[in-house]
Amino acid sequence: MNNRFKAIITIFFSLFSSLLPFSLLGQKNDWANFARYADDNKALQENGSEPVNAIFFGNSITDSWASMRPGFFSANGFVGRGISGQTTYQFLSRFREDAINLRPRIIVLNGGTNDIAENSHPYSEEKTIGNIRSMVEIARANGIGVILTSVLPAAGFKWNRNVTDAPEKIESLNRHIIALADEFNIPYVDYHASLLAPDKRSFRADLSNDGVHPNAKGYEIMESLILPAIGNYGNAQQ
C-alpha cells in the first residue's frame, strides 16, 4: 500500500467518523445515567445537610422503594440511589458519583436481578460478583461501611423470556454474595427467604404485583430486616 493510498484511507475514515451521531461515538450516551441524580447529589454536598446515614444503591427495586416509601427514607436519614433497569456493571460505573462522594456512613447494596435478566451483558456470575466485590473494596477504602443484600425471588422476567432458569441463578448468586460478605466480615441481609413463595421459585404473590418488584407490604418486610442491620453496624466492621 503506497503512501498516497494510505492517506486517502485515513481521510475517508476521519470524514466518516465525523459524520456519525455523537451517541454512536459514545460522546452523549449516558450509559450509567449519571444525569439521574446529578442535581440531587450536588444539593446534598453543598447545602450542609445532616450526614447521610445510609445510601440504598441498586436498580428499580431500590428506585421504587424510595418513591413508594419516602417516609422510611426521610425518617432514618437514608438516601435512595436506585435506577430502573441497571445492572452491576452500571452500578460500578456510577458508584463514586452516586454513593462514595456523598460520604454516607453505610451503603446498602442490592443488585443482580438485571444481570441475570441480561439487561446490559450476557450473564456471568463471576463478573457480577466481581462488580460487587469492586464496590465493596472501593467503599471500604473510603472508610464507608457496606451491607450486602440478597437478590429477590423471581420465577422469570417478562422482558426477557429467554432466561428460563432465573430461580437457580438467583440462588447461586445469593450463595456467592453470602460468601463475599463472610470474606469481608460485613453484614448480609436475606430478603429472599422472607419474600419467597411456597414453590421455592417465585415471589410471594401477596408481596409483589409483578413477580419481580415488592409492593408496599413487601417493602415493609424488607424494612424490618434492613433496619436492625443498619442500626447494629459497628466500627469494627468498617
Image (spheres, rainbow, N blue to C red):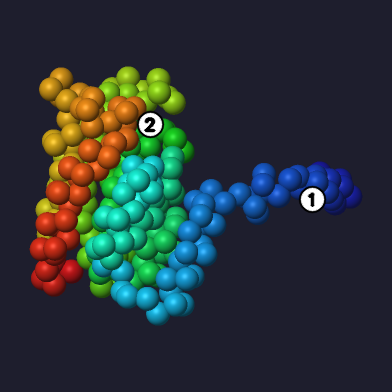
Mark 1 vs mark 2: in front: 2
Q: Farthest residue in the right direction?
A: 4
Position of residue 207 relative to residue 162, above or below, is: below
Position of the C terminus, as image quadrant, is bottom left
Tell me which residue sits at (67%, 47%) in the image. Answer: 23
Position of residue 20 relative to residue 46, above or below, is: above
Tell me which residue sits at (27%, 23%) in the image. Answer: 155
Front-most of residues 104 and 114: 104
Q: Is residue 137 visible?
A: no
Front-most of residues 216 and 118: 216
Give the labeled residue for mark 2. Answer: 117
Amino acid type, label 1: Ser
Tell me which residue sits at (84%, 45%) in the image. Answer: 12
**Element under disc 1:** helix
Count of numbered badges drawn on the protein: 2
Precedes in sequence: disc 1 or disc 2: 1
Give the labeled residue for mark 1. Answer: 18
